[in-house]
Image (cartoon, helix red, strand yellow):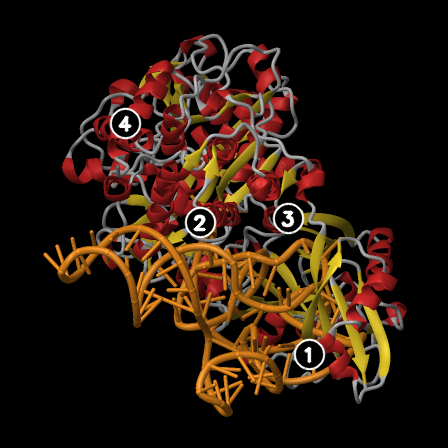
Amino acid sequence: MAYNFTEVEKKWQNKWYSEGTFNASNDYSKEKWYGLIEFPYPSGQGLHVGHPRSYTALDIIARKRRMQGYNVLYPIGFDAFGLPAENYAIKNHVHPRITTEKNIAHFTEQLKALGFSFDWSRVVNTTDPEYYKWTQWIFIQLFKHGLAYKTTMPINFCTGCKVGLANEEVVNGVCERCGSPVVQKEKSQWMLKITEYAQRLIDDLDDVDYLEKIKIQQKNWIGRSEGAEVTFPIANSDENLVVYTTRPDTLFGVTYMVVAPEHPMIEKLADKITNMDEIKEYQRKASLKSDFERSELNKEKTGVPIRGIMAINPITKEEIPVWVSDYVLITYGTGAIMAVPAHDTRDYEFAKKFDISMKQVIKGFSDDVVCDLDKEAFTDVETGILINSGFLNDLSVEEAKKKMISYLEENHIGVKKVNYKLRDWVFSRQRYWGEPIPMVYCEKCGWVPLPEEELPLTLPDIEDYEPGENGESPLAKHTEWVNTTCPHCGGKAKRETDTMPQWAGSSWYFLRYMDPHNDKALASKEALDYWSPVDWYNGGMEHTTLHLLYSRFWHKFLYDIGVVPTKEPYQKRTSHGMILGANGEKMSKSKGNVINPDDIVREFGADTFRVYEMFMGPFDQTAPWSMESIRGCGKFLDRVWNMQEFLVEGDSYSPKFEKMMHKAIKKVSSDIEEMKFNTAVSTFMTMVNEFYKAKRINKAEFKTFLQLLNPFAPHMTEELNEKLGESKTIAETPWPTYDEAKTIDDEIELPVQFNGKLKATVKVPMDAEESTAKEIVHNNETVTALLQDKTIVKEIYVKNKIYNIVVR
RNA sequence: GCAGAUGUGGCGGAACUGGCAGACGCACAGGACUUAAAAUCCUGCGAGGGUUAAACCUCGUGCCGGUUCGAUUCCGGCCAUCUGCACCA
């Protein structure tokens, strides 16, 4: 009879979720395993087919771990604050709480229909006051430890909507929603000092098991560089221009300086500058661009010379011109650079464009290495030798750097300096749908945190989600909420009206899962000690630099104040590739290539969906969706179901399949650990093909096969297991084991090559010695025939791999 | 621009640590079953040459070059595509 996936899947899901089959145990004596997936943002579109890729992968590992005897925590929750809900509210005047509730209900239904073994008793929701109470609590601790501060930062400001915009909402310099021009506007913002943790965020990567490319991305994002800060006096004034450079060795080659348009020196020296109007105009234009646009557009360099002032090279005492250009960013280093056009690509382009002189101070190690300054900058750091550089002449770049830094320090014109590209975290949002920042401003006492017993500071219910005139948060209009008393002196005070970014709630959610209903602490000490750290965290590569870094930062802070027991939150981090539309492009409504998971479950069932997502390609790489291929996975599962037809009795593996069974257990077990799910599925397919060829499978073989397949296709395998008359479900059985000796073949097909080209294969015993192999090879007819008119030069034998004969 | 990744048949992909390139699946073609179709089962399937059929020969893992008995794999240089870039999540 045909397999009715709809009925069977419902049956098992009802059982699992009503009985709480997969809920983590509070028995802290058992060995634990904590698997984590990035909790979804419950968008109005519902689940995306990309979500189940990651969830199925860790579900497979979680199910395997349970069978291996671990107490498994595999939780789920919702990261529900965010921009889409707020924009929807502005447009349709529906409170974000209502849409969020609705969306969460929809997501829950969809996730349950896929049969994930989540612990549904521990669901967290970042918008729940009982949850964000602790997000606020962490913020207050950060503030108390001096890691949260206010500063003025530029934001994208839409001149039409009068609202601060995310970079994503700015398209070609105009607002995505209304099309009005977007400008950079200064705004006082809460910042978190993540830079204080920069070095530790790099160093502690050594202690965790992250994919190498994730570590590299994180390190590059933090962007540590060693160099020097050098002070250039401004001629005929008391002002100095301090620059940061990673190339102090090139100080003799400086031919001009550049300051960022926002550099304060311009204001200070305004009375000396003779072309102030020109500079003001340039600053205005630059203020329209974001940092990103500036570096993106740097093919066409722009800039204006600052007339009336000259800087003095502290080493050569030469007077050099100062320019203003937006290729220098105020947010990195000191906002000013010394330019060495002969040895830096960006400086070179700028100097070429504005016809500024260049001075070569490094040459190639040998005369073969050409340095042609008419064509390009010479940037070979590895082998370069200093020239035209006084006391640095003939040194290598590395030596010259060291010598110059000591010279700078001895003469008090510069210091060695480590710099990071990482910037502090802008933590304020002028938005409604976020956690209120639990701070109060008092004229007398300044910024005062709310007393912890007053948390949570709940988000007030409002009906107008539009921002205020000057881009303040919608909360600013609600004076009855804003006006309060100072917790410190009792005087008049105002609440902070900005809210937290979505990153806040997702920076610590994995801790809450450990003890989600605790109202005394974010989680109990016992729960934290037992479950920490997360053993395996899988998520998108796109979260590598922001979410992952932010949550590591928070965790380290919580470790420092004694809240959590580990320095790092995640022991292991892997990532999955994106699922693209059938046309190879990212799925989007506008492209019409979106696949709805509900349709797939309805047409093919959850098991087929799961197997297909695991089979479609290497887990960590992008893969296009294919309706044809998913059908193939459905066919495979039907073939599994139909194996019942030739099932025979048997308590142990039959001799015919014994090797195959042991090999398969080994292969599937290791493939799951290495996330090579696609090859695990192909192993299952090959096994099924073998059973079909023999038209026979015995009960012992079938049982093991079902156990191995269970994490991938849990519904069908449990159903088949029940039909076998087993009293225990597969989930209650131990993961199959194999005997290494039984995975090894007695005899192998050894390829025989002539000059590296395959000419024959011979059968040799496993691990045959060279003499044995040689004898067998030379007795082979094809080989003797080919050797007729040839001379053997050399013979190469690699045990169990190859026999290569080099002939003339 | 900076950073990370990817490139193998008509398509998705496999290949352990440098050792038979194309496992497994899709599509396609042929056959069995059927009044017929679908489903199912079986067989074939990189390109070119060769053969009644086979054997066999040549080419082939983005491009150019190198190391090696042997390179999809290692090295150097290019090209193309995808992802992220700090207020999307």
User: Which picture quadrant has residue A627?
Assistant: bottom left
Q: Earlier in the sequence, mark 2 or mark 3?
A: 3
Of the numbered discs 4 and 3, the one sitting upstream in the chain is 4
Q: Secondary structure at mark 2?
A: helix
Residue topped by disc 1: A358
Task: Say which residue label 4 marks.
Answer: A10
**SS class, disc 3:** helix
* Screen quadrant of the C terminus of chain A: bottom right
Question: Circles 1 and 3: CB distance less than 8 Å?
Answer: no
- Image vertical order of residue A318 relative to residue A668, above or below: below
- The answer to whether residue A191 of the structure is visible from this angle is no
* Chain letter for the residue marked with disc 3 in the picture: A
- Image coordinates for residue A700, horizontal then vertical, percent: 52, 31
* A220 sits to left or right of A727: right
In front of the other: A160 or A17: A17
Amino acid type indicated by mark 2: Phe
Q: Residues within 10 Å of mark 3 (few under 14, many from 20)?
A: few
Residue type (three-letter) at the residue carrying disc 4:
Lys
User: Observer-nearest residue: A574 or A61?
Assistant: A61
- Does label 2 lie on the same chain as label 1? yes
| Residue with the mark numbered 3 | A212
2 and 4 marks on the same chain = yes
On the image, numbered disc 2 is attached to which residue? A615
